[in-house]
Each structure stands twice: as structure tokens, then as C-alpha cells.
Image (cartoon, coloured by chain):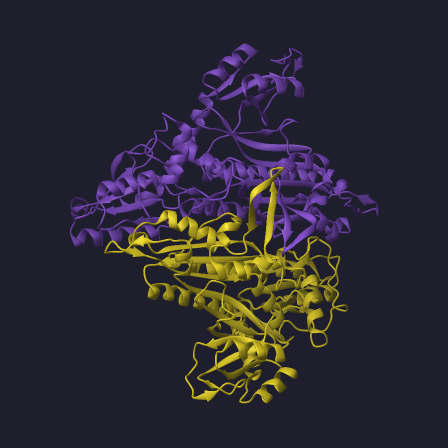
Chain colours: A yellow, B purple
Amino acid sequence: MSESYSKKNLTKKSDRFSDWYTDVILKAELADYAPVKGCMVIRPYGYAIWEGIQRFMDERIKERGVENAYFPIFIPEKFLNREKEHVAGFAPHMAVVTYAGGEELKEKLVVRPTSETIMYEMFKEWTHSYRDLPVRINQWNNVVRWEKRTYLFLRTSEFLWQEGHCAHVSHKESLDTVDWALNMYIDTYQKQLAMYGIAGRKSETEKFAGAQQTFTYEILMPDGKALQGCTSHDLGQNFAKAFDWHVQDDKGEKLFPWQNSWGFSTRSIGGLIMVHGDDQGLILPPNIAPIQAIVIPIPGSSDAVFRYAETVVAQLKAQQIRVKVDARSNESAGFKFNKWELKGVPVRIEIGENEFRKEILTGVFRHNQQRTEIKPYEIQALLTDLQQKLFERHKEFTEKHTHIADTYDVFKEIMSTKRGFIRALWCENPACEKKIKEETKASTRCLPLDTRDQNGLCISCGKPAIHQWVFAQAY
Amino acid sequence: MSESYSKKNLTKKSDRFSDWYTDVILKAELADYAPVKGCMVIRPYGYAIWEGIQRFMDERIKERGVENAYFPIFIPEKFLNREKEHVAGFAPHMAVVTYAGGEELKEKLVVRPTSETIMYEMFKEWTHSYRDLPVRINQWNNVVRWEKRTYLFLRTSEFLWQEGHCAHVSHKESLDTVDWALNMYIDTYQKQLAMYGIAGRKSETEKFAGAQQTFTYEILMPDGKALQGCTSHDLGQNFAKAFDWHVQDDKGEKLFPWQNSWGFSTRSIGGLIMVHGDDQGLILPPNIAPIQAIVIPIPGSSDAVFRYAETVVAQLKAQQIRVKVDARSNESAGFKFNKWELKGVPVRIEIGENEFRKEILTGVFRHNQQRTEIKPYEIQALLTDLQQKLFERHKEFTEKHTHIADTYDVFKEIMSTKRGFIRALWCENPACEKKIKEETKASTRCLPLDTRDQNGLCISCGKPAIHQWVFAQAY
């Protein structure tokens, strides 16, 4: 494929953040705009990141006893209409098939925005007794929520995700799954993507359409806006009742199963790019990087150098390091350095005559451009260390940009200048939430899980408020 | 989930093949009818088979240097119209989105029936020089080809597959990929699914809409009909020209890339079920079976027996055998035997007081109901042997039902009675092919790769014919 890895043209992250974001995605070949309104193409380098996320999560999903399955992409409109809040939430974003097989359809089919309704229709058929519970299903698929403007990874009409759907005999068991899913997502962000965030519960206004409670991991981006990283929903018995899905409990009585659903999407890749990248391009944390180390024998070196490079690659592969060698003769060393920096490979290994003679390697770390002499057997440990450093860096950034606002004036001042997360007392009245959002663009992101009760006053209306919520302008 | 594994109600394969097929899929919980016309739900047990196929093929695809990516599910109608044969072939099966985001779309969007057109539009943007070739892309996704009646796995409006799309500087390189893909599919069938078949080239009538040549693996089903197991297409330069996609060759001149595409779908699971199953239900070849061995401690046995069963399970797991224990106390031994037979688990391991005392296992093989005393360390070898036996059994069946017809009378006689594959001389005139199909239901399946030139006469028109083609009634 055509390669034009010139960093000369790369917008600076520090100058115009939003342009930099799009630019780096296109130039590093993570994704591209599709010739279909609102859609994107995920190119191999971007898709490999998604496959890394899938591998990590799929193993955990299976360990939990949740099984993968596949449900149709088309949902009859009437199913979506059954849960009132659900349809109200999704109706504006639906893509609808009206013609198929050369005929107008009698029943219009919605391209799934999420699969609660079609799944629960089937769960209802498959279960009759409490002994048939829990039902534990996950699917990796594509969903469609219509958007007019594409913002690569972050806002596209179609995206990829996993959606888990479980149903249990008790609310307690269901909540346990909701909690497990949220923690799996937090692990994915922290251990794979090196992204810090705040875990908490969504407000009534911000929760999923049809849920009783929604939990989230909110992540602060370098521009001071927050990204909702995932959601895990306690659906209570809402959908079971809307679908009249009940089984016999152990006393022979009607039991409406307690349900939950949880999703994690390719949106996460957008966050990954923003959080770690710099003026030179992407910076990928080693655990998720499709290529962890790029070996570059200096062009023009002797054959022995190239042979030595091959030996080094074999040594790294034996340590399960995802390594690639760039030994093409038609490009300069400088071009190659630029290219792999732009693509965010955590460590570059340069090999020339000097390295060959001394049997050493020269490593250059992507995140700090530090150049150092390293041994092949040290790389795995260096990558582990680097993963941790990137996480700590983002954690420090987030903490530095998390403010406490005791008054609405301070709140407004922060939002109009530096932004970031704001912890502030709110009375939980949606009217105040709406007013704050209209006046400052900041919406409630979550009530942190580690919150403590206080005796205070709402920063908006001055009425009693017992919790500090986290606010931010959302992506 | 609800379990009703009564084999009493299972239709006999020998009695009514088609009803048995549907029955066994529903009862073994491989799949279910969806509440959307023409669609199915792939349940966890069926999906695990698909995941097995994916694991096997994805590794080979990556080894070949083909990279996974993701392209949009929506294709603008005008793209499909660019290659005339292509659109003619798919138009009757298109599902079309006409409304989205609450508005009527100016440009209708087709839910992808296959992704040639949307991919090639992008490849065109990404490549400028012969140095940018080859392009090697694969995607695992869902596609939609509208059907009114569902035949589980074999004919559904939506199905899952992989579609590989490569483009090369020369026809020779492209043909090499076409050949490689076909061989990967044959390996998947033979080594994983234990299914024998005939590899060959499709006739002009039967080839893919827009291809220059199509290659296939045709598999004989127990009812004497043939299943097209996969396809690998040599697209020549047809699509490149239709899309005006050209790059500069090494002399600075216009080069239209040589393309190929190749696909393998969940249809294969339909064939797997048909080929191996019997009156007791599924029979899964060990390499693809989600559960290779089911350990059943006889209900009512002493605690020591159950502990011994756990030890056995650990021993088998240590050998990488996919094993499950069914130790539930609320079901009888007979119920459990039936259930796992219906689900086609290759070997059942019964453990009672006798087995515990003597430190042996009683194994019962699914495919022949043979009961034998086995040691844990023997199971891996027994499974390998069994895999081979199932393949040989299907190969023998196919050979026994492959006939040579020297005259049209013999051809018609075979088709009206026992069916199967028929090898017969055909002049390659589509008119004869059409007439034969109308009169006997048999279509050309392929020209086998190992064919030899002959000096003969077409069984239909009596004009010169140099090749024996394989005919059969197709699924």
C-alpha cells in the first residue's frame, strides 16, 4: 500500500488537537473515511489493535461462563417499540431497511443499534424454569446508530463492539455480573490500553435507554473533555416485563429474570490515540501495540549487519515479543524512523556496524525518544516497565486536571478555561443538571464508586446535596 | 437454558433426511429460527464450531501475509452498478436501507451482499504505484442476501463468513493466491471438518458474478445432493477496469491490478451436520468439536467416584483435550448419555465404582457406540484416529456415490434414483448445461482439477467434448 509517512505535514497535537487526531489516524493508516456518509474503514493497523482488545476480553468473557453467539442484524420495528424509553433513545439514530429481495417489506427492519430486544425475544423461548437461568450470552458484532458527520472511531454510523447480555434469578446475581463486566473493562483500559479513568454510576438522564442503572469508566482526554469508555447496565426487570418474559421459580411462581447488558466498542481506540500520542504521531502502549519492537538494520550496512538483525529478531520472537524488521533497501534510515514513530511502535532497535561488532543493540523509546544501549533479553522487562509508565503518566495528567468546585462561579471559570474533570456537589435534580450543561457544556459523567456521603449544597440550586458528582464536557 | 434432549422425538436421518436435519439443529441447540424472516440465531454450541473454524483459518490467513480489516456494511447502490455482471447477480437478493436518522436517504444504501465494490473503491485511493501492491485484505463479517425461506445454516438472509480480497501486479501472482485460498479451504474441510470433496473450476454459468474463473470444493451430502463448500475467484482485471483502478508499473505505465476474492461461510456447518450425523443426533469430528470428551460420573456413585472424575478431567485438560464433566445430580445417567450423544461429543467417559476401583475409564465412541476400556493418556491418540476415520468414511461414501455416465439415459436414470456425483462429458455449451439441469435437476458442479483431456462426445448434444465434468443436484 502507498506509504507517505512524512511527519512534516503532521498537524501538531499541541497546536490543533482535533486536526492532529484525524491526521494521525489517516497517516498512521489506522482508519480512513469510507465513501458512505458517517462510516469509516478500519485499516489493518487499526484492526490489529481491536483484535488485541478482543483477545484480552474474550478470554475473560469465556472464563466467566459467558458464551459467544450470533443474533440477526435486523430487528423488527415492533420489538424496539416494546420498551418505551429504549425506542425513544434509539429512534433518531435508526437505519431502516424498507426494500428487500426486490419487494417492499410489510414489516420494516431496523439495522440493530443494540440487540436487547431481539435477544430477549429468543431468551424467552429458550427458558421456562429458574433452572434454565442464568442465561449468559455475548456477541462480537457491528451495530448502526446513524450519524451525519464522521469523527473517526469516536462517532461513526457503524461501529464494532461486543455486547454481553445476561439474565439471572436474582437482582443480586445480576448486579454481580454488572460489576464483573465493569471491572473487566477497567482492566482492559488499565492493563492493555494504559488509560486511567474514573469508574462510577451514570445519572438518571445519562443512563442507557431502558436501564435501571448504568455504570461507566470515564476517561479524560488531553483537551480536557471526557470520553465514556464503556457501559455496564443493570436492566432490573424492565425488559423482562416489557417482553412478558417469565419463568417458574422454585416455588412454581412467576419469576421475571433480572437482566444486565454491557458493551465495549471501537470507540476505545479513539481514546487510546488521543491519550498517548504526541507531535510525532501515535504512541502505543506495549501490551496493545500490534508491533512492540521495530528492528531497523541501517541501510547501506554490510550483509553481516543484516544477518545479525535477523538473529536479534529471532531472539525477540522467542520471547513472544511482537517484532518486525524493516530491512527494505529503497528507503532511508530517516524515512523509516519517521514511519515507525508515526505508527507509535514502543521501541525502535537500530543495528549498524557498531552494534554488530559489539553485539549490542541501540534502542530508542518512542514515548521519550531516549536512546540507550540494550540487550535482547532486557526488552521484555523494558516493555513491561514502559506500559506502567504510560499508565502513570495518564493517571498523573488526569489527577492534575481534576478540580473541585465549591461554587458555581469556580465551576464556570474552570469550564471556560482549562476544563478537565470537576467534582462538585449536585442535588440530583435533572433540572440543575440540564441548566449546568446549557451554561457550561459540562454534563454529569458519573457518581464515582468511591464516593462518600456529605452534608452539602448543590452548586446550582443551593438545595441539599449529599454527593460530589464528576462533571466534564463529553465527547 | 432449557434442555429437552429427548431423542425419542428426533426424526430419523434414514427416514426423513430434511426433517432430521432441522430437528437435530434445534434439539442440539446449534441454532434457532429468528423472529425475522429468512434469518437465524446461531446459538453458543453452533457458534463455538464457527470459532473453531475461525481459529484454524485465521492463523493461516495471517501467515500468508493477508491482514484483517473492516469495511462498512453499507454500500452505495452506484458502486454495485459499476460491474454489470456483479449487480445482475446480486440485485434480486439485496436488502436496501432507504431511511436513516429519521430522513429519507438521497442515495440508497445496500446492506453488503459481498464487499468487492466498497473495498476496491478504497484500494484505489490507497495505491499509486506497483510498489504498493500486493494489497492483501481479509474480513470476518456478516453479509446479507435476501431469502424468503430459511433453511438453517444453508440458506439464510444473513450469514457469517470471511471474505479475502487481494490485488497483484500479475495474473500469475493472483492465480497463486486463488490456489492458496482454495487449498486452505480444502485443508479446513479435510483436517478440521473431516469432509471429503471434489475441488475444481466452475462453469461459465455457475461462476461468481464478475469473476473470470471460480474455483470450488464440492461436497456430497448423504441425500445425494452436493454442497458448494467455498469459492475462490480469479477476478482478472474486471473490477479494476470497472472501477478505473490503475497504478503505475515499473516503466511508469498504467497497470490495472489483478484481483481475486475468496470466501468461506457458516454454510459449512450445515454440511458438517449432514455429513456425519446419524439417527442419534450430531457426530462432531474431534478437531472441530467444542467438547471432545464428556466425563459422566454415574449419578448416585460415592463421593470418591466424583473426586476421581475430577482427577480424570484435570489429566485430560493437561493434554489440551477440550473436556467437560456432567456431574449434575438432578438428571439420570440415561438422560445425560442421550444429551451428549445428541450433541455429537466424540467420546463419552463413564466413571462408576468399578472404574474408580480399577483406576480405569470406560469410553464410548459416538460414531460407532463402541464401548471400551481406556486409559487417560490414550485419548488424544484415539481422537486423532477417530478424526481420520470420519474423513475416510465420508470419502468412501462419496466415492461409492460417484458415477460415470456415458450416455444421457444412464445420467437420467442415476438422477431419478440414487443421485450423487455424476462424471460425464459435456461440450461446455451453456445451452446443454441448461437443458440437463431442467430435465434432471443436475447442474455442473465443477471441472475437477485433476481432469484429463479426452476425445469424446457431449452426453447432451453429441458434439465433441474434451472434459468430464462433475454434475449433481445442488443445495
Q: Is residue B266 visible?
A: yes
Image quarter where the C terminus of chain A lies is: bottom right
Side (left or right) of B95 relative to B354? right
Residue B67 lies, in percent from the top left, at 61, 51
Q: Is residue A181 above or below residue A414?
A: above
Residue A120 lies, in percent from the top left, at 42, 53
Q: Is residue B170 above or below residue B202?
A: below
- Comparing B365 with A70, the one in front is A70
Side (left or right) of A302 relative to A430? right
Q: Quadrant of residue A389?
A: bottom right
Most distant residue in the right direction: B252
Side (left or right) of B106 relative to B13? right
Q: Is residue B65 visible?
A: no
Residue at 53 percent across and 61 percent down: it is A88
Residue at 74 percent across and 64 percent down: it is A335
Q: Is residue B237 above or below residue A434?
A: above
- Comparing B386 with A460, the one in front is A460
Side (left or right) of B279 relative to A394? left
